[in-house]
Image: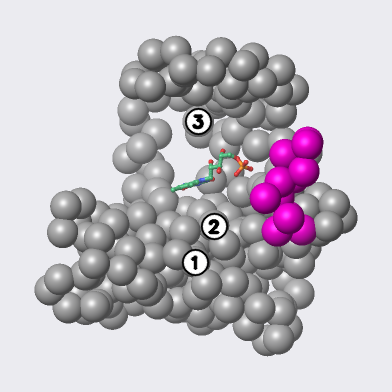
Amino acid sequence: MSDPNGRSDHAFPEAQREGLYRAIFERRDVRSQFRPDPIPPEVLARLLEAAHHAPSVGFMQPWDFLLIDSREVRERVHDIFERENARAAEAHSGERGALYRRLKLEGILESPLNLCITCDRERGGEHVLGRQSIVEMDLFSTCLAVQNLWLAARAEGIGVGWVSILDQQDLAEVLGLPAHVYPLAYLCLGYVDDFLDGPELARAGWRQRLPLADRVHGNGWQAPPADAALTRAVDALAPRQ
Ligand SMILES: Cc1cc2c(cc1C)N(C[C@H](O)[C@H](O)[C@H](O)COP(=O)(O)O)c1[nH]c(=O)[nH]c(=O)c1N2
């Protein structure tokens, strides 16, 4: 049931809804604003609980959370990043290459805690409900745990940075992962001096947010929706940063 302005009987009160949208729109990927202060265990527990309540294909819950606070391990991971980032930089030349080389793309050593969220590709056995047709659904499910944690962290005032410029084999070896456990997300966590008011890559001039209206299609790729009012509604959306 919904009221005339489309609000469901099950909607949260305005202030709670605002809190959720604030976490979504103010979440940032953090690389350089980390403070050294440790995250209290009870706060970290809330973040992991949020991650663990993500949806997952066939309720597989394929994720594990490796809490990495060893300086020695983080230095080994940072070495992997350095090698991979040097390789990635070779793909860009001229001004773009100079801009790439100026970008800070990790906070592995500055953040007080690193967190690797893995995906156990064998969890739930051979026939996981919903995974027969598209076998990557365990990876996609694990990504949702990452985003739950990322939004919960923003609500707690904790910064998160995802570092993917890493050789997966080398990372798996450093972390001692079994062959069937996929290192899906390597995250840097910590309190921050501040949250930027927009994506750092946009501020640096690397790439801007695409207009939402161009991303919305109807009943097929670039087909119009049946109800033109829907398109007008999306077009009317104020472009966010
Ligand atoms: C799967 C995946 C992987 C990465 C990222 C994100 C995601 C989703 N991002 C962060 C990314 O650059 C950032 O999300 C966008 O620039 C948008 O900025 P906000 O997250 O809105 O601040 C990211 N950032 C970075 O500095 N180094 C990295 O290796 C990565 N890798």
Query: Residue 68: x percent and y percent?
Result: 50, 78
21 versus 191 height, above or below: above
Query: Residue 229: x percent and y percent?
Result: 62, 16
Magenta stretch encompasses residue 154:
no
Three-letter code, disc 2:
Gln
Asked whether, in this view, residue 132 is left or right of residue 50, the answer is left
Q: Report which quarter residue 175 is drawn in.
A: bottom left
Q: Report which quarter residue 127 is drawn in.
A: bottom left
* Distance CA(mark 2)–CA(mark 1): 9 Å
Q: Mark 2 points at which residue?
A: 147
Numbered disc total = 3
- What kind of element bears circle 1? loop
* Residue at the image point whose x is 50% and y is 23% from the top: 216
Q: Which residues lie in the magenta part?
A: 1-12
Front-lying residue, 23 or 103: 23
- What kind of element bears circle 3? helix
The answer to whether marks 2 and 1 mark residues whose Cβ atoms lie closer than 8 Å is yes
Asked whether, in this view, residue 23 is left or right of residue 208, the answer is right
* Distance CA(mark 2)–CA(mark 3): 26 Å
* Residue at the image point whose x is 50% and y is 75% from the top: 52
Lower position in the chain sequence, tag 2 or tag 3: 3
Looking at the image, which residue sits at the far right? 15
* Residue at the image point whose x is 59% and y is 21% from the top: 230
Lower position in the chain sequence, tag 2 or tag 1: 1
Query: Residue 206: x percent and y percent?
Result: 56, 25
Residue 100 image label: 3
